[in-house]
């Protein structure tokens, strides 16, 4: 079958690989109808992780069940499903406690497993024609038959629940104000989730105009272009003080504001500062407020900028953090904690997360779209692949 395969930094190829097979009685094989390129795939694409060459990428996956193992009871061929990016067993201590992102039985360097992702197990990704689904009864979420809401439902694999998770980690409640750093798919979904939850004021910080426009149009957000303004100054001034809650949807490849020294391209490695967003959150969230961090931070980076400290070590202004009594929640999203209710919100017309989708292309165009997405090209906000 065809799959999008990693061949080295900034090098993706569509190649033929072996079709997946059932490896246990609880497995299923999924015929993929829609998959997507995620912003966190770019860390691997840029060579900033320990991902092996030859791996198929892709952890945002939906499709039709083609085959099930003899132990699968709730699924049958022909069922339409979406897969949480978390691969979880369903019965370990963490899964039972609903922390499915940290499954203790995943074959992984760290707690939890993910399709086609660095340090998160040997699982092939879903930017392909088919994928094996371990623990299928537990992991696959059933969807209505047909093709309605296809673009919305694929968001349930990762970005919509992850954006929601960011607001949950921050304990955002109706009537509260919030700032979201990062206007990529997850950041937009965090701002959209804040709107759905009834936040009073929503601020979104990014520098790509197409992202800022989507935030204003669909999330009712006040936007700040950090290339032009310092969010730690402009947000408290506009809001009349610091906001109640904050979300980091950027992660360790954040860059400094650079309002006086623009780089040549959309991303300038010399401006990278992994602590930038966390320090900006300290500067924009009120004392005793809470912050949710869903942007990815890795403990292993084979290719960091020379000026950046060891991977995972941040120059955080901890004194101000302590003085303000801020509380911080971190970690990957436990998709199964949210996906059923978010699915039902889509079915009932309460949520339409597909507003972030900018491109729908065949699998053969994946290498080009990786390049364009990585360049933060205007108008490339979310790319769906149709195998």
Image: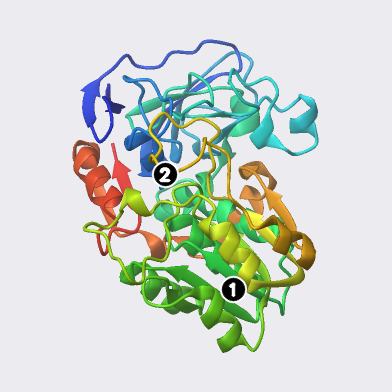
> How would you rate the neighbour count of disc 2 (Cα within 10 Å): few for under 14, some for 14-19, many for 20 or more?
few
Compared across the picture, whether 329 is left or right of 354 comes to right
Residue 347 shows in the view: no
Element type where label 2 sits in the image: loop
Q: Quadrant of residue 324?
A: bottom right
Any mark on residue 307, and which?
Answer: 2
Q: Quadrant of residue 54?
A: top left
The residue that appears at 36% across and 44% down in the rendered structure is: 37
The residue that appears at 80% across and 27% down in the rendered structure is: 93
Any mark on residue 195, and which?
Answer: 1
Residue 285 shows in the view: yes
The residue that appears at 45% across and 36% down in the rendered structure is: 59
Q: Nearer the viewer, residue 341 or 380?
A: 380
* Residue 33, x across and y down, in percent: 36, 39
Q: Nearer the viewer, residue 145 or 40?
A: 40
Question: Considering only vertical position in the picture, is 292 above or below 113?
Answer: below
> How would you rate the neighbour count of disc 1 (Cα within 10 Å): few for under 14, some for 14-19, many for 20 or more?
some
Any mark on residue 69, and which?
Answer: none
Element type where label 1 sits in the image: helix
Compared across the picture, whether 271 is left or right of 101 comes to left
* Residue 264, x across and y down, in percent: 21, 58
Q: Earlier in the sequence, mark 2 or mark 1?
A: 1
């Amino acid at each position: 079958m065809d799959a999008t395969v990693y061949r080295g930094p900034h090098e993706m190829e569509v190649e033929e690989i072996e079709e997946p097979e059932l490896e246990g009685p609880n497995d299923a094989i999924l015929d993929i109808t829609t998959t997507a390129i995620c912003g966190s795939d770019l860390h691997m694409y840029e060579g900033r992780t320990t991902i092996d060459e030859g791996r198929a990428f892709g952890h945002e996956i939906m499709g039709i069940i083609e085959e099930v193992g003899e132990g699968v009871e709730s699924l049958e061929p022909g069922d339409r499903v979406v897969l949480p990016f978390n691969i979880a067993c369903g019965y370990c201590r963490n899964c039972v406690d609903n922390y499915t992102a940290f499954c203790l039985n995943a074959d992984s360097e760290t707690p939890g497993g993910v399709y086609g992702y660095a340090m998160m197990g040997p699982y092939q990704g879903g930017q392909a024609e088919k994928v094996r689904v371990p623990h299928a009864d537990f992991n696959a979420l059933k969807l209505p038959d047909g093709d309605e809401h296809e673009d919305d439902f694929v968001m349930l694999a990762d970005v919509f629940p992850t954006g929601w998770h960011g607001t949950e980690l921050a304990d955002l409640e109706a009537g509260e104000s919030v700032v979201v750093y990062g206007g990529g798919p997850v950041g937009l979904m965090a701002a959209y989730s804040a709107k759905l939850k009834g936040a009073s004021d929503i601020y979104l910080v990014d520098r790509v105009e197409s992202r800022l426009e989507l935030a204003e149009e669909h999330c009712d957000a006040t936007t700040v272009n950090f290339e032009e303004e310092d969010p730690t100054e402009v947000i408290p001034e506009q809001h009349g003080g610091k906001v109640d809650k904050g979300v980091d949807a950027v992660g360790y490849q954040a860059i400094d504001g650079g309002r006086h020294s623009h780089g040549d391209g959309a991303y300038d490695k010399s401006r990278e500062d992994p602590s930038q967003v966390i320090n900006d959150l300290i500067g924009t969230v009120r004392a005793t407020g809470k912050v949710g961090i869903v942007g990815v931070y890795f403990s292993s980076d084979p290719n960091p900028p020379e000026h950046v400290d060891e991977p995972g070590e941040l120059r955080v202004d901890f004194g101000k953090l302590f003085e303000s009594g801020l509380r911080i929640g971190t970690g990957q999203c436990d998709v199964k904690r949210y996906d059923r209710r978010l699915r039902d919100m889509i079915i009932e017309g309460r949520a339409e997360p597909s507003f972030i989708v900018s491109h729908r292309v065949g699998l053969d165009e994946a290498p080009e779209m990786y390049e364009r997405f990585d360049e933060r090209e205007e108008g490339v906000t979310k790319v769906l692949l149709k195998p």
